[in-house]
């Protein structure tokens, strides 16, 4: 029977072979063959990802604290493919990507290690509470809010979870978030509290990532349960590793950065010279003749 490493290597080689076949079919304009090969390529990528996940789980399960180790690890690399574009946007064929990031499924890992997974219901209930908070902030009607209470997608067990009422402050959100962290990873600090603590920065990250513009005009889309799990996992990763949050934005090119710095320096120097010249100017007072 093949080992996990052998399966990973075999699946990777299969993907490379399928990409080569696809690119050959592209040159021959064989659409039927291209469709078949792309489907087979996706199947191989899925099998590769599954094997990589199993390899990772096996390694993490051997750690002294597997759940903490998984949270610190956070993610792993899988392979994928993308279309290479030539001049004028012409498709030149697929190319292999070997650094596609995939986040660990913490619920799946806890099941793998035979650890408690009931906390997943707290995450779902927390999601609904945040959705109700968003509805309150948007000044939605009582009827609309009641509908959210009744129809929000969640498991029966999640509906039975008691986490308190709709959070009306960031402090309340932080407390509810801490409740989940305590369920997943707890280490007494000697004073009856968890060593791993959520803070206001975690709340800010959660709220900034939680919503986006909805598909309908004047609507807001809140996180689905799967995405909510990812956000909570991100925060636990920050708590365990002590990392800091970052901000992604559209950046100007390196050349423009250099130009902007040079312009700022020149402006500063010019301002300095003007100030220096002004200080050297003597004020002449003309007295009136008697």
Image (cartoon, rainbow, N blue to C red):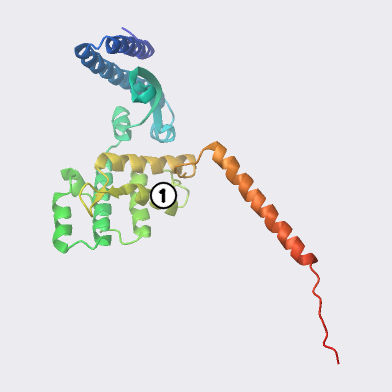
Q: Residue furthest right?
A: 290
In the displayed structure, would residue 144 be above or below residue 184? below
In the displayed structure, would residue 178 be above or below residue 86? below
Residue 230 picture quarter: top left
Q: Which quadrant is the N terminus positioned in?
A: top left
User: Residue 287, percent across and down?
Assistant: 83, 85
In the displayed structure, would residue 140 be above or below residue 6? below
Name the foreground residue: 124 vs 58: 124
Q: Which quadrant is the C terminus positioned in?
A: bottom right
Residue 184 picture quarter: top left
For disc 1, the marked residue is 202
Name the foreground residue: 14 vs 114: 14
Q: In the drawing, does residue 94 fall left or right of residue 69?
A: left
Q: Is residue 135 visible?
A: yes
Residue at x 25% of width, y 60% of height: 138
Tell me the SS state at disc 1: helix
Residue at x 34% of width, y 55% of height: 173
User: Residue 172, percent across and down?
Assistant: 34, 58
Q: In the drawing, does residue 154 fall left or right of residue 169?
A: left
* Dot 1 crowding, Cα within 10 Å, few <14, some 14–19, many 20+: many
């Amino acid at each position: 029977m093949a080992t996990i490493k052998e399966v990973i290597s075999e699946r990777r080689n299969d993907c490379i072979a399928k990409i080569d076949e696809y690119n050959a079919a592209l040159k021959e304009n064989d659409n039927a063959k291209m469709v078949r090969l792309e489907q087979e390529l996706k199947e191989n990528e899925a099998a590769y990802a599954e094997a990589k996940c199993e390899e990772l789980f096996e390694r993490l399960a051997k750690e002294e604290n597997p759940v903490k180790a998984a949270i610190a690890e956070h993610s792993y690399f899988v392979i994928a493919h993308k279309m290479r574009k030539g001049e004028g946007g012409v498709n030149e064929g697929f190319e292999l990507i070997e650094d596609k990031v995939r986040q660990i499924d913490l619920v799946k890992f806890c099941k793998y290690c035979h650890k408690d997974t009931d906390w997943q219901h707290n995450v779902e209930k927390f999601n609904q509470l945040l959705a109700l908070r968003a509805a309150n902030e948007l000044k939605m009607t009582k009827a609309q809010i009641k509908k959210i209470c009744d129809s929000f997608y969640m498991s029966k067990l999640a509906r039975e979870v008691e986490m308190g009422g709709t959070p009306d402050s960031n402090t309340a959100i932080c407390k509810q978030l801490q409740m989940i962290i305590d369920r997943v990873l707890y280490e007494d600090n000697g004073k009856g509290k968890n060593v791993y603590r959520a803070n206001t920065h975690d709340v800010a990250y959660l709220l900034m990532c939680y919503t986006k513009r909805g598909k309908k005009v004047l609507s807001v889309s809140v996180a689905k349960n799967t995405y909510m799990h990812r956000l909570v996992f991100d925060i636990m990763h920050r708590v365990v590793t002590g990392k800091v949050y970052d901000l992604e934005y559209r950046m100007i090119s390196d050349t423009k950065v250099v130009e902007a710095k040079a312009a700022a320096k020149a402006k500063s120097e010019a301002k300095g010279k003007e100030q220096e010249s002004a200080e050297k100017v003597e004020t002449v007072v003309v007295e009136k003749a008697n």
